[in-house]
Amino acid sequence: MKKQRPVNLDLTTIKLPAAGRASILHRITGVAMFFAFLFILWAWATSLSSESGFLLVQDVMQGVFGKLIIIGTLSALAFHIIGGIRHVIMDMGHWEELSSGTTSANVAMGIWIVLTVVMGVAIW
């Protein structure tokens, strides 16, 4: 029996609430940190292998690509921690209503943006 249900394949027409955006960002930053961890492992292993490896990693990290990787990694870590704290507080029974959940999501994303800008200015 075929079910008649609405199908919306145009993702640009879907408007997520703030809590939905915060939840998706929390998952995306988790995946981003996994891939950043691979870069960190490479940098760590290369820098400990020899003096030339250390100098190579130092040159990479002082370049534009390295700085973008550092800022991106710290930004992902910052939002993941902020979002994780928000989720823990929600698990304890707070901020579960629509208005408080929206407010907490907006505050978490605002803090994340401010921290990312501050870290970017400090690193660059």
Image (cartoon, rainbow, N blue to C red):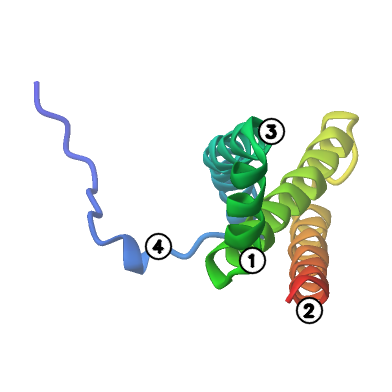
Element marked by disc 1: helix
Marks 1 and 2: which is nearer the front?
1
Q: Amino acid at mark 1?
A: Lys
Q: CA distance from mark 4 to mark 3?
A: 48 Å
Would you name the residue on which mark 3 appears? 48
Which element type, helix, strand or loop, lies under badge 3?
helix
Q: Which residue is mark 1?
A: 67
Label 2 residue SS: helix
Residue 26 percent location from the top left of the image: 64, 45
Q: Residue at x 52, y 60 (%)?
A: 16
- First in residue order: circle 3 vs circle 1: 3
Mark 2 or mark 4: whose residue is earlier in sequence: 4
Return the residue nearer the eye: 3 or 119. 119
Residue 14 vs 4, above or below: the answer is: below
- Disc 4: CA contacts within 10 A as few (<14), some (14-19) or many (>=20): few
Q: Which residue is mark 4?
A: 14
Q: How many residues crowd around disc 3 within 10 Å: few (fewer than 14), some, or many (20 or more)?
A: few
Instruction: Please name the residue that numbered disc 2 is placed on.
Output: 121
Of 89 and 112, the residue lying toward us: 112
**Residue at x 16% of width, y 31% of height:** 3
